[in-house]
Amino acid sequence: MQFGIGVIGATGFIGTPYRHEIRDSQGGHKIVALCARRLDRLQEAAAEDGAQVVSSEWQEVVNHPDVNLVLVLTPDALHYEPAMACAELGKHLLCEKPVGINQQQAADICEAYRDSGLGHFVPYWTRYFPVFERAKQLVDSGELGTIRTVVYRWHNPRPLAMPFTWRDDAQLSAAGSLADVGSHAYDTLRWILGAEAQRVWAKSDAVMPPKPDLGPIDLGEAITWGDVRDASPQEAAEARQALSTPDHVQLSMEFPGQMLVTMVLSHASYVRKGFAPELELHGTKASLSVNRITSELWMANSPDPATRLETIADNSLGNRFADYVFPSIQKQIEGQSSGHPDLEDGWQVQRWVEAAQRSAETGTWVELD
């Protein structure tokens, strides 16, 4: 099937590379309509994509008769209305994570698509990195035995001088770093383990001080601006805004079988990456470390130090639309299980995000309801 594609949030940090991959895909898929808040960027994007329609109103994308697949790539709080409209109008959907601003929105969108015959995809890309795919193979093979403890670190430090973005704003972000990188980390974990967390304890906070407020800039612009300021410090004359979402989260979780999981999620500039593997899986037969940065897997099956199991030569994701999105939606249209992350996964992950939020607020263990 050929897809006529509408992109909401078309010119931002996420939308721009997505559109590039769509243009590079085979199969006759066409970008038909684009929506973004910055019209100057839209005109340039339309010329690149050959799009028929550009608009600052998402309804013009969703309602366009030649659009049968919609990408919702806006801030978290702006997913719900266009996603529900897509379901009502019979449009296939790719919705960025987290699917909604809360668990109820994610459940509503998931229910609207369940048994609809429509394709839907939630881009939890981390599970597609070859080092994680290899880790899942080893877990599924039983080579590690029964997994008893897990440590997962996701450190994604931002430039020290990086300005305020919507991810720092609780009115637009579901839960800061917890929802942003935490969604990826938890989905990868539940996918590798084949299980959902039963309960969670979390401590979250905004570690970084108030940030320069430059208005509604996107993440790419914010990182570039911060990098320049970090390299050439100047007097900070800009207005500043305090973060209302956490940029550092520490979690403990219990999975079935008394499996214990520790997770650290951070965008704070003070938490650098590269000191330790991202993921450790400790089983009754062996332990495995997975390092996405170096593309290495290490294993130990005795008290002796671990040894390198293998290094993945190409740990890239490739063309995500050609390889994963389009085939997944096509399978669903044909009534098959796609094996790719969809709105059901999006809802399960948002259950976890909301439980972790409640735990951070109450200081207690919270069951996933």
Image (cartoon, rainbow, N blue to C red):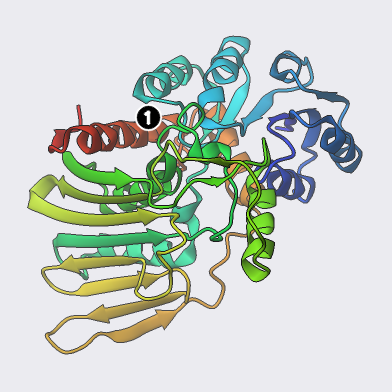
Residue pictured at 50% horizontal, 50% vertical? 125
Q: In the displayed structure, does residue 303 sit left or right of residue 265?
A: left
**Nearer the observer, 244 or 79:** 244
The residue lying furthest to the top in this view is 88
Indicate whether 119 appears above or below 111.
below
Q: So how many labels did they put on this image?
A: 1
Position of residue 220 measured from the top left corner of the image (x, y, whole percent): 67, 51
Q: Secondary structure at mark 1?
A: helix
Position of residue 317 measured from the top left corner of the image (x, y, whole percent): 58, 59
Position of residue 163 measured from the top left corner of the image (x, y, whole percent): 60, 48
Q: Is residue 91 visible?
A: yes
**Quick one: quadrant of the C terminus?**
top left
**Nearer the observer, 10 or 122:** 10
Residue pictured at 83% horizontal, 38% vertical? 41
Q: In the displayed structure, does residue 94 sit left or right of residue 338?
A: right
Indicate whether 18 appears above or below 6.
below
Q: In the displayed structure, does residue 42 sit left or right of residue 57?
A: right
To which residue does mark 1 refer?
A: 347
**Quick one: quadrant of the N terminus?**
top right
